[in-house]
Amino acid sequence: MTDAVSQPDQPETFQGGQSDLFSKFDPLIQMRENLLASGVEDPFGLVMERVLSPTTAICNGRETILLGTYNYMGMTFDPDVIEAGKQALTDFGSGTTGSRVLNGTYAGHRAVEQALCDFYAMDHAMVFSTGYQANLGIISTIAGKGDYIVLDIDSHASIWDGCKMGDAEVVPFKHNDIEAMEKRLKRIPEGAGKLVILEGVYSMMGDIAPLKEMIAVAKKHGAMVLVDEAHSMGFIGPNGRGVAEDQDCLDDVDFVIGTFSKSVGTVGGFCVSNHPKFEIMRLVCRPYVFTASLPPSVVATACTSIRKLMHAGDKRAHLWENSRTLHAGLKDAGFQLGTDSPQSAIIAVIMPDLERGAAMWEALLHEGLYVNLARPPATPANMTLLRCSLCAEHSAEQVQQIIGMFKRAGAKAGIV
């Protein structure tokens, strides 16, 4: 009798001989089991029992500082935002139960799209149910079979999925490498449709793209440009419009993708554009047409938050101060960071491996600090990261507390 272990190409079977479609996940299942067997808490199963503010919550029965929520501008507990959501819930009910092209467009949906147009000083705005859907919908609709997409290798999963769904030819290039991007563009056949996709801030390492130079190269080769500003909208730039505004090249961007689940403090996604034909997207973009629209209470909170972010210069300045202070404090303590200097509200702390990263994550949680444990394959170069995302509502005292927590946890976990 042949030992099944000696036949790796045969699919695993269960329940009357059916092939087990879950067998492809066995390595990940084993990795998780090994991690939990070492005695650490499940870093991907944390429950927040109560959220007290944008910067604190009750986790495992104790008050915990939040440093992994992407709540960059701290709008989740803004009194005006909360009141707007309550009023919309009273006036319009809990949901639309329909698509935007059917019964799912309420006054609030038009209002939040107008707020986005005003925020970005652009002509058109289109709101999706999530930021993921915004990338999925816009990319898959505008770039299809026969077109070419040139994108950074470190692009977000939603960008890659949008490329796959649209069936365009995908041409990746080395992260933030302008020369590599231009080489790819030069090889595209003359007359083919071209879309260059970039991100303002890359969410794993917190580094920014040289958008001004990259967009100039893209335009030289006749490509349209889409920039995902999910992690910079509201914070970076004089008016919070993102890295493209900060680098004075926003007028050269054809499509800006963003999300409500970061600085805006709720949920949803959007695309803004000045393209004169953009409104046809409402009839041809499947992830927009074939999904229910956001609840009235959500668009009301988003609209109020966006309009307040237009006048949030002091909050932006304080968040930058927090980022500089934390980056310097962790660097001085001996931690290896993802960037040489603070470039955004994200600070990535590089861990030696997943096991010690999980141990450090748990040590921080016991100190009363929550951060994100990021692991391969989501991370660049298969790194394990502790990803910190600062908030404009973190006080200077809290940032100093955080530095002390990292020092103590790092010594306990043997990281520093």
Image: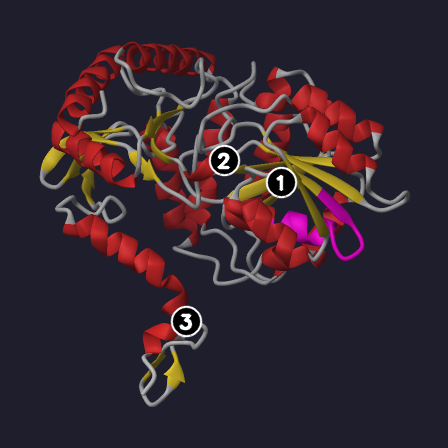
Dot 2: few (<14), some (14–19), or many (≥20) neighbours within 10 Å?
A: many
Distance between mark 3 and mark 1 Cα atoms: 46 Å
- Dividing the picture into quadrants, the one containing residue 238 is top right
Q: The disc labelled 1 sits on which kind of residue?
A: Cys
Q: The disc labelled 3 sits on which kind of residue?
A: Pro
Residue 101's disc is: none
Q: Which portion, as a residue range, is magenta?
A: 136-149
Q: Measured from the top left, where is residue 243 in percent x and y?
A: 58, 22
The residue at 76%/33% (across/down) is 183
> On the image, numbered disc 3 is attached to which residue?
8
SS at badge 3? loop
> On the image, numbered disc 2 is attached to which residue?
303
Near-viewer residue (8 or 368): 8
147 to the left or right of 14: right
Residue 370 belongs to the span the image colors magenta:
no
Residue 271's disc is: 1
SS at badge 1? strand
SS at badge 2? helix
Q: Is residue 120 above or below residue 35?
A: above
